[in-house]
Image (cartoon, rainbow, N blue to C red):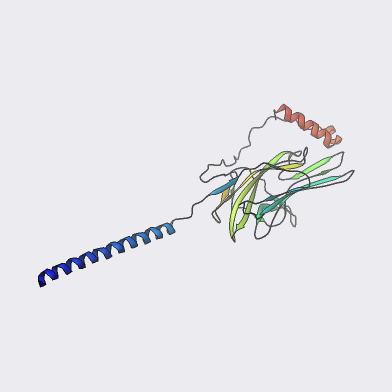
Amino acid sequence: MKSKASSFNSTSDCDSLHQHLHAYALAASAAGVTMLALAQPATSEIIYSPTQVTIGPNQTYSLDLNNDGIVDFTIVNQLTSSASLFELNLFVQNSGGGNAVAGHIVNSGGFPWAYAFSSGFQITQPKRHFTSARATMAWSRGTKWASSWGGSWPGTYGFGGGGYLGLKFKIKGKIHYGWARLDTDLARSQSATLYGYAYETIPNKPIKTGQEQDNQSVKHPSTSTPTQPARKQPTLGMLARGSSAIVAWRQKQLAAEGR
C-alpha cells in the first residue's frame, strides 16, 4: 500500500512539474515576443497631402504639414501699390518653436532667401542650411512703364517660376523634415499656387523633395541642362516700353511653345 501510495504521489509531482514548466515556457515565449516587438525599429512613413490652392495678392496660406491643427509655416503674398508704383513680396515665415526654411543669406548682412529646389534634393541637416527668419521667395516691383523681378522663384521675366521649399519643423519637440511645392506667376496673376506638401514621420530622417511615399524613386536633378524650345529675347525697344510690352511678348512665346 505504501508502495502504491508512493507511486501515485510521484506521478502527481511529475505532472505538477510539467505544468509549471509549460506555464514557464509560455510566459517566457510571450515575454520574448514582447521584447522582440519592442526591439523592432520604428516604421518609416511619409505623409503626403495633395492640394491646389492659389495664394493671390495680399493673401496668406497657413501650412500645417502634419495636419495636427497647429500652423507650422505661413506663406505670404504681400502687395503694396499706389497710382504710379507697386511692390509685391512673396515670402515664407515659420511659426516659431524651432521651425525653419532651407535658404541662404544674400550678401553679408543681407536677408534670407528661400531655396527653390527641384525634385530629388535631400532635405536634412547639416546638408542644408536652414533659417528661422522670414525667407523671401520672390519679389516684383515697378511702375506702369517698367517692372523688375528677383528671388529664386519668379522665373524668366516673372513667368513660370516655382520649385520645392525645404522645411524643418518639430512634432512633440523632435525635428522632422518636409517639403512644399509651389509655382509662381508674378507677371500675370501676381500669385503663387501650392500643389502639395509632405513630411517624414521618423524624427531626424531625411526626405527628398517630391517624395510622396517611402521607397519611392525620386529622380535626382540632372547636372546637364534640359533641352528647351528656342526662345527669342525681347528687344531693347520692347524693354523700354515697359512691363505691358514684355507681358505681350511673353504670351506670344508661350503660345508658340504650345503652353
Left or right: 167 as drawn, with respect to 21: right
Residue 188: x percent and y percent? Answer: 78, 37
Point out the image quarter for the N terminus. bottom left
Left or right: 51 as drawn, with respect to 185: left
Q: Is residue 88 visible?
A: yes
Residue 151: x percent and y percent? Answer: 73, 46
Residue 206: x percent and y percent? Answer: 56, 51
Q: Is residue 126 visible?
A: no
Seen from the viewer's position, the closer of residues 211 and 227 is 211
Point out the image quarter for the C terminus. top right
Q: Seen from this angle, which residue lies furthest right?
A: 83
Taking the spot 36% from the left edge, 60% from the top edge, the residue there is 30
Taking the spot 66% from the left edge, 53% from the top edge, the residue there is 101
Seen from the viewer's position, the closer of residues 171 and 248 is 171
Quadrant hosting residue 148: top right
Taking the spot 42% from the left edge, 57% from the top edge, the residue there is 37
Q: Is residue 238 above or below residue 151?
A: above
